[in-house]
Image (cartoon, coloured by chain):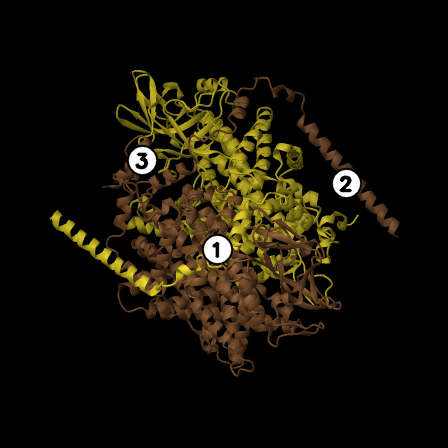
Chain colours: A brown, B yellow
Amino acid sequence: MSSHGRSESSVGGPVGRSVGRTVETIAQERENCPFDVRKLSIIQHGSEKDLLLKEKFMLELARDPIFYLGDIHDLTKDQLRERTFEKIGSLVYHVTNESIETFQKRMEIIGLCDPGFWTRFGVHYGLFLGAIRSGATPNQMSYWMEKGVISCQGMFGCFGMTELAHGSNVAGLETTATFDEQSDEFIIHTPHIGATKWWIGGAAQTATHCAVFAQLMIKGKKHGTKTFIVPLRDVKTLALLPGINIGDIGKKMGRDGIDNGYIQFTNVRVPRAYMLMKHSQVSREGQVTEPPLQQLTYGALLSGRTAMVADAANTAKKALTVSVRYAAVRRQFKSSPGAEMETQIIDYPIHQRRLMPLVAQATAFGFTALEMQRLFEETSSALESLEPGDPNLNEVIDKLKTTHATSAGLKAFCTWACLQTIDTSRQACGGHGYSSYNGFASMYSDFAVHCTWEGDNTILALQSGRFLIQAYQEVLKGTTQAGGTAYLNNIETVLKQKCKGKEHLISLQGIDEGWATVAAHAIKKAANDYEGCLKKGQSREQAFEVCSQVRFVAAAVHTSGFVFRQFRAAVERVEAGPERDTLELLCKFYGLWQMEEKAGFFLRSGWLDGELMDYVQEKVSEYCAATRKFAVPLVDSFCISDHILNSPIGCADGDIYNRYFRMVRRNNPQLAEHKYADKILQFIHRSPAEMEDVGEGIDLDAELEEMAEERAEAEKEAKEAKEEEEKAKK
Amino acid sequence: MSSHGRSESSVGGPVGRSVGRTVETIAQERENCPFDVRKLSIIQHGSEKDLLLKEKFMLELARDPIFYLGDIHDLTKDQLRERTFEKIGSLVYHVTNESIETFQKRMEIIGLCDPGFWTRFGVHYGLFLGAIRSGATPNQMSYWMEKGVISCQGMFGCFGMTELAHGSNVAGLETTATFDEQSDEFIIHTPHIGATKWWIGGAAQTATHCAVFAQLMIKGKKHGTKTFIVPLRDVKTLALLPGINIGDIGKKMGRDGIDNGYIQFTNVRVPRAYMLMKHSQVSREGQVTEPPLQQLTYGALLSGRTAMVADAANTAKKALTVSVRYAAVRRQFKSSPGAEMETQIIDYPIHQRRLMPLVAQATAFGFTALEMQRLFEETSSALESLEPGDPNLNEVIDKLKTTHATSAGLKAFCTWACLQTIDTSRQACGGHGYSSYNGFASMYSDFAVHCTWEGDNTILALQSGRFLIQAYQEVLKGTTQAGGTAYLNNIETVLKQKCKGKEHLISLQGIDEGWATVAAHAIKKAANDYEGCLKKGQSREQAFEVCSQVRFVAAAVHTSGFVFRQFRAAVERVEAGPERDTLELLCKFYGLWQMEEKAGFFLRSGWLDGELMDYVQEKVSEYCAATRKFAVPLVDSFCISDHILNSPIGCADGDIYNRYFRMVRRNNPQLAEHKYADKILQFIHRSPAEMEDVGEGIDLDAELEEMAEERAEAEKEAKEAKEEEEKAKK
């Protein structure tokens, strides 16, 4: 049966030539693929087991009616929230029965089709439970487990960190937790509107308890921000407890499936034991003990950032799967008057330029995310196995710092690049990209928050830049760098390196050296500017502020090189064969395209000259054309099911117009009541004279002149009043 | 009364220090302003009259209950559409009583606060009426005027151009209009699903008539795309007429206030006279007369693009008004431990880097939009005054081509830059930028379509690039260029120019020369590559395709230079004084920042060397700091009222937290019914054993192994089946 059989008879005729062959067209795109799609897919997913796991989860989701996505774009905020809650129930079973790694993979997939739900679930399991896990003493942990925190039985948590006037500056939070020695309780209080807990996911409707970050106050003295578990609602009725005022934050740019709320506490009392006391302790007498190593609490931030790097890779691949498949089957304009069909838009060099480099980048991000996950696991287990007085302490702290800086830079630059990829993909699908039913609108608005939460991207990029300056300084002092900054060793040689010609320029080794050299120059510039500020007598903090732009640039260049290096390492682990060849091509493509994007730095550092830069541009165009040839099987190897894509113009079988048409029609029944037809009729049948004659006599110029005079008069009065006031002051 | 008086007593205490001084802080930002805000505002708006007109319109809108915007983010698509329709009535009076220029200004302001409405209104008045105006004979014009097209009495129009399978390629549209000589009628027909009219604004619910673009077919022969007025609905009942099938396109990324629909025609008959016949005619006998000059129909596209350049400038200014004011009053982190208050985020150099260049750019776009409007008016009136056999014909056509190419490049690059500005502004407002109530979410999603409609930006950029190549070729042939490409005259000298040192580098003249030189190099490269393709035997169309990336680059570089030049010209028209100094600073800032952004081209062309490029970066940072000093009064001079901003964190008086809190609370009443409380209670009180024990016995590894085997089996079968099939074929 040909694709024609799929058309809807109701549309009044056979499917036209321009449309009907989309299925055949995409099938042809899969012919003569130079690599084995399955093999390439396994490589990208880390292992066959991981790929199978993903497929199992995708299949389960596609079959689960509660994860039906066809109607998602027409649900109201309140409907979305209710549905989110219904999904929670279907997952609690898995969270308590699966290994952490398996469940994380499951969540990674769910996050890709329902980011709002992912957030609500993550607020309890990642943030609330995470806060208890990392902050509670063993006794406290048992207490909350008995209360039901693991299986959400008897409680459901949220995470009360940000306030209306404080986000990034956690140490500056203004909610207070005052110790009342007499009753052995803390009094949680919101002193003013700016200290209102704001954006708290789950607070508006669903949470019973909150992990509240508040300033510990004892006998009038501040002891910094600590975490307190505060019951919000009666678990039998969901009624707010005394002193708790909660409201709904309402409509957001995206992720409306999560009920963000605000919370104001008016002298709410909790037992002393509700402060999480693994790190800092408050005794019965109000004595505070602080932890020896503040840095060790950093670890908590890593897991979110690691997940976001993976999400950036996955979401970019999702967007590109749609835009590449659409580009393959969409035809527009005939290349020659005699052509039988119009040209596939993917065959236009400029369209390749729009999408192909992003395909290479998304592939690079995929491998980078695997490496980030590995780093995270390595660091976490090193942290967990740390004993008091451990001789490895310094080593572990170094590792933690490195992983922290790496995750900061990657989170920032990968989420930015992904956001750009989504919008470029949308634009590449023309008008149909603007329809909600093709998924880009929600993909963008849901993803956008990644650039802001868990560390604003700009601030994280600067943290990465600060780390790079310090690494450079250490190298100058003779300390060897390991990991992502190892290229700074032998710094003098690295800085002097130059590209040895065209062949070197486009070899994996040459590209690698190029990024090392250019990043080293950018870091050196940042470090020198910083030193210069110190010499002028500025404090370290001042100097870092003044050098923020160069720090930012250093982090950007370093991160592109880092991503390239992860990709290269992954390529070199693959056995020789067409899959490795394909990945090597994409790896070079990514490295050179990023060179073109950051051309100024490459020319400035002298790594290459103008002519070689022209050659880079030429090669990038060449790689665009080469990648186009296997673009459809390549995005197939990303392995994202039609259900997860939820985008008819990106469907695997290429039957885009019929599917899109059906989706639009299903969600907008044609016989629905017309709710304002009477208003339209009234309007077009109003009497001809109505309104039109009141306009006579209006003199616009006179009106404006009067306005100008009134204005001048008012200004004069204001000025006089101010002068009076100042006179009175004297 | 201090700002404290404004706080809500209900929040449980006085306003905190971090929050309470926002009003004082923004007031301080307006002290010691180096320029007269009013004067600067007048300069940017073109004249005092234009500014007063804008203020009059903003005041009217703010007072008109139908233009209340406080609840707009919580309305459903259907509610938005109904409200859009109610607004129509309030504007028809003005459209029939005001001069076209005055009304256009009114629409420009309305478009800034309600882009969805602007679109619905524009579909009738701009597109539908515009199609009739430009395409109807005088007799036809009178006919439709009698039917009520001007005042929307008895009819309300929509514009049926795009189809499901055709957007950019208008000549390839597949709806047919077959002439039936016997009845003297056209038969309008949708032959297949791909020819369904798609995205038609107003079609879903509100339009009675449609200007349909269809292939004229006479006696089996195609005569190209023409326009036909087709009645869609019974004007007495709004019931669909026979043969018309209309559906709703449903949810879109933005602009849900307009009811986009799809239309399928099944042999719908209209009188011959319903084809618009000013340009092409069909006689009673089916003879077709084509217009002598196809180019003259280009003119219709200009007005939309001109309006979009203005909208890009205005919307960028709107986004920046919010983000700059927020940056001025938002405080985060203390710069020194002893500081009384935390630091205004606008004082961080990196935050200045995020916003200040965009402020300079938006100012540049504002002046560019004024120039574009002037060009448009000049060209339109030249076109309108053209008589048959006019001796000025070639000159007018040249002007039309130039204006067309200029509008194409500006539409593309200004709308892209504006979209970026909106999102950067959102991110600069941190979490609060993600709340719908602060306006960035809808600003982005409403604006995004500008990059796609009325000419996809990439395609328009390429048109501009094609024009530049042609201009370059003409210069080589000795023809002098006027207007935006005049810098190409004396091309040899221009190409050889080099920056004469730091002073030259940062002078208006020097920056101007720099852009001319670098643009000339980019255009030369594009032209040479193009010539190279022709020499290889490629057709002109092929050659242009192959050179699309270099064409794109040429257009991008040229457009930045063009915008700079408009800004410079505007600056030089201002009389000496602080306003001119401020604008000159911003003009240099824009020119140098764009140099930094496109550094690769400046280094590659040899206009400057690495050291001078470092100086550019240094100056850009310096200008960031300089602009920060008057950033608040500068955005005040953009003159966008709080009502239009509709963003509490961007309000003029700086009382951001109280206003934001009130807005959130007003739109999310705290005592509203909790619609799924029972589900939450059921969930957290389910019996402990429920579900948890079904997991026993699951062996994940075994399950995955089985999946892998099944998969391998299925692949094997598919392969065998394919081999069978191929054998059978032989």
**How far, Cα to Cα, is label 3 from label 2?**
68 Å
**Marked residue nearer the N-terminal end (3 or 1):** 3
The local secondary structure at tag 2 comes to helix
**Is mark 3 in CB contact (under 8 Å) with mark 2?**
no
Whether residue B279 is visible to the viewer of this picture, yes or no, is yes
The number of numbered discs placed on residues in the rendered structure image is 3
**Marked residue nearer the N-terminal end (2 or 1):** 1
Amino acid bearing label 1: Trp
A53 left or right of B34 in image? left
Q: Nearer the viewer, mark 2 or mark 1?
A: 1
Residue behind mark 1: A118
**Is mark 2 in CB contact (under 8 Å) with mark 1?**
no
Amino acid bearing label 3: Glu
Residue behind mark 3: A8
x%, y% of residue B126?
50, 30
x%, y% of residue A231?
62, 58
Q: Quadrant of the N terminus of chain A?
A: top left
**How far, Cα to Cα, is label 2 from label 1?**
55 Å
Closest to the observer: A247 or B254? A247
x%, y% of residue A660?
37, 41
**Which chain hosts label 2?**
A
The local secondary structure at tag 1 comes to helix
